[in-house]
């Protein structure tokens, strides 16, 4: 399917954007739109990333998730290095069309560069749990997943870590 | 629970941020961190928003979702106007700690200012569905939810619409 056939509409009115059938995505001042990616079966949030215009058009045309890597400043076909391609089961857009929700199938693979299945493997205690568990001035993250799906060193070698301090 | 007791750690190393037990969130150049909010029962993505430092600390201390409204440029206790407060069941942080995942309970209410349960009520055809359904140059969004939970005019009156073109 040619990516050239994916055409976005201009944003003309709030009614069009919120309650119409046009796809008129809003890219921010960096040219990016926020993407939330969940596992199509479990509903688990796997990762949050960004797409530029080209990445969104490629995702729609191919049915495989493409992102824009902020750390590398380049188009990123997810899984090109690790092999864990994300098959898009459903792509939804939010009310003001500045966020994309991808429901994907990773076929047992991982979506996190640290090696876990999901990027969200640590929990912050909140409310009563926070009050009960914490001593003043400290928050201790609780692990929700401790089993890595792959070894990042084997998969990525000496490629720069995308995490920025 | 006093919000003053919620203290974040400085970001010192990639190992600390990715594989440690410190909560050391990364706020961007606007002072914001991305938030993904899902229904704790169904897994459905309800909305995507942002928190500043204060909103994240209030959410942890109270167990109710607080955001930072970019359109109003102010702290936003979700549900203060509509009554649809989000009770936080679980709060997770991602690998590089620049994104928060909230699993919430809205007790039958809605999280979308347009009146729908979720902000994501329209689907974009992708891959084979895109190829089959579309004529060249057009994308038609498909509705996944058509039943509004509330009437925005009744709830918000003449308040400015947060959607920007």
Image (spheres, coloured by chain):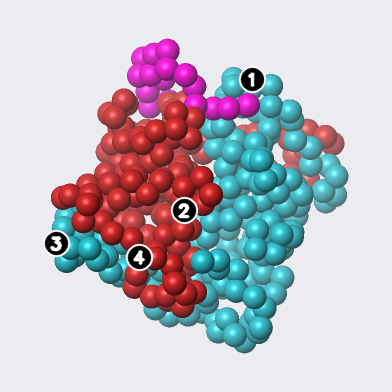
Chain colours: A red, B cyan
**Residue with the mark numbered 2:** A27
Element at label 4: loop
For label 4, the crowd category at 10 Å Cα-Cα, with few meaning under 14, some 14 to 19 and many 20 or more, is: few
> Residue A140 vs residue A151: left or right?
right
**Residue with the mark numbered 1:** B13
Q: Are marks 3 and 2 in contact (CB under 8 Å)?
A: no
**Residue with the mark numbered 3:** B132
Q: Nearer the viewer, mark 3 or mark 1?
A: 3
Q: Nearer the viewer, mark 3 or mark 2?
A: 2
Residue A152 is a magenta residue: yes
Say which chain tag 2 marks: A
When the figure is inspected, residue A48 is found, relative to residue B48, above or below; the finding is above
Q: Residue furthest bottom?
A: B154
Q: Residue at x 14, y 62 (%)?
A: B132
**Could you tell me if residue B39 is visible in this image?**
no
Query: In the rendering, at what x and y percent does residue A3 appear?
Result: 22, 49
Question: What residue span does the magenta drawing correspond to?
Answer: A145-165
Assign the C terminus of chain A to one quadrant of the image.
top right
């Amino acid at each position: 399917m040619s990516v050239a056939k994916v055409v976005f509409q201009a944003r003309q009115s709030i009614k069009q954007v919120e309650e119409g059938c046009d796809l008129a995505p809003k890219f921010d001042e960096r040219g990016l739109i926020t993407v939330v990616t969940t596992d199509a079966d479990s509903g688990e949030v796997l990762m949050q990333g960004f797409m530029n215009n080209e990445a969104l058009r490629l995702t729609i045309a191919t049915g495989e998730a493409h992102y824009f890597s902020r750390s590398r400043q380049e188009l990123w076909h997810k899984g090109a290095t690790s092999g864990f391609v994300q098959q898009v089961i459903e792509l939804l857009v939010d009310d003001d069309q500045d966020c994309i929700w991808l429901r994907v199938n990773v076929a047992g693979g991982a979506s996190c560069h640290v090696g876990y299945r999901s990027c969200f493997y640590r929990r912050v205690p909140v409310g009563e749990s926070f009050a009960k568990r914490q001593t003043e001035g400290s928050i201790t993250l609780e692990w929700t997943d401790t089993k890595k799906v792959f070894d990042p060193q084997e998969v990525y070698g000496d490629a720069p870590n995308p995490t920025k301090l």
